[in-house]
Every structure is written in structure tokens, then in C-alpha cells.
Image (cartoon, helix red, strand yellow):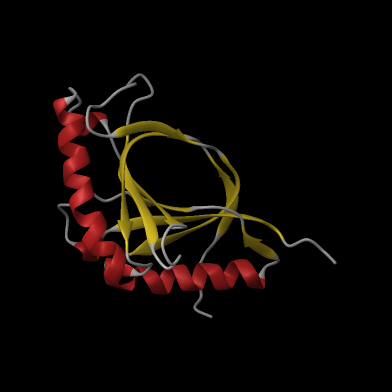
Amino acid sequence: MAEISVEVRAVEPQHVATVTRKASGFGPENIGPVIGPIFPAVGAAVEQAGLSPTDYGPAVALYAPDESGDGTGALVTAGFVIPDAVSEVPGVEVSTLPVLEQAAVTVHRGEMATIGESWDALVQWIQANGYELAGVCREVYWTPGFRPQSEWVTDLVQPVRPVASA
């Protein structure tokens, strides 16, 4: 297992403007082509609603299994954290992601092409440390998308719970 630093902690709710699209599966090869166009579209909608780029962010994404069809797909929800006072943005969904009482959080640095390795290491850490997956994972992108991916800093957030003892 790759050495990673993981913190198990609560994650505060996030008020977001997002769009959800279907991907054919998980992994950067399936997610990348779907998520790439979402951020500029949501950013444009948020700005048309009167927010400047300094008024919103960071970018966020959630990945859930797509229960329709053959069950191998993923639902990709992506957008930006926005001020709580914003209740409507035409063309996108405005909602509040709930608090996560307990999540395993680590940081991925660099290219999105290798983010799967960081996720694999996080899941291995979770299983090796007496936890199990307990909900939809999130990514929080702290580096503006116009920066080279080699500079990106992304939080990987996986809700967890202790494994029930038998």
C-alpha cells in the first residue's frame, strides 16, 4: 500500500451550484471527458447570476454509482461552492451538500491522470484501519483550473464508519 497521510474528521456542509451528468464508468478515462465541460458551464452560469470568480469556489465533484442501466456507470456531479445567500442560479442546481460526520480525507497533488492511484491508496488505508465506505465520495479542487495540472491540489473525501464488530 502506498504511504499516504489520512485524517478522519467531520466535513462541514457546502452550499454549491452543480450539474449532474452520466459517465460510462469510474476512473479518469471515463470521468474526465464528462467532468471537463461541466466546470466552465457552471462557472459561466454563476457569473451570469452576478457572482465574480472571487465570490465562489473551490470547485467540487461527487461521484456516485449510476443505478440505472447495467449499474457500471457513474453519476458525476460537479460545480462550485457558492455563498449561502445565493438561492438560485439559472441552468444549474443550487443545493447544500450535507455535513459528513466522519470522513477519511487525504490530498492528491498533481495530474488527474494519477488520481485513481490516490483513491486506491485511500480505500486501502480505510480498510486497513478498521473503517468501511459509508457514502458518496467528494473531491475538492483547491487550485484554479487554469493552472497546470502538475500544480493542482485536490482533497479526496470519503465518508466512513467503523467496521461493525461481529
Residue 54 seen in the figure: yes
- Label count reads 0
Q: Height in image: 97 above or below 127? A: above
User: Quick check: 101 left or right of 158?
Assistant: right
Q: Residue placed at 48% from the left, 73% from the top? A: 120
Q: Residue placed at 67% from the left, 63% from the top? A: 131
* Front position in the image: 75 or 37: 75
Which quadrant would the N terminus be assigned to in this image?
A: bottom right
Q: Residue placed at 19% from the left, 24% from the top? A: 49
Q: Position of residue 99 (x, y in %)?
A: 55, 38
Residue 32 lies in what quarter of the image?
Answer: bottom left
Q: Position of residue 31 (x, y in %)?
A: 30, 63
User: Quick check: 52 left or right of 76?
Assistant: left
* Front position in the image: 110 or 166: 166
Q: Residue placed at 29% from the left, 38% from the top? A: 57
Q: Position of residue 7 (x, y in %)?
A: 56, 56
Which quadrant would the C terminus be assigned to in this image?
A: bottom right
* Front position in the image: 147 or 27: 27
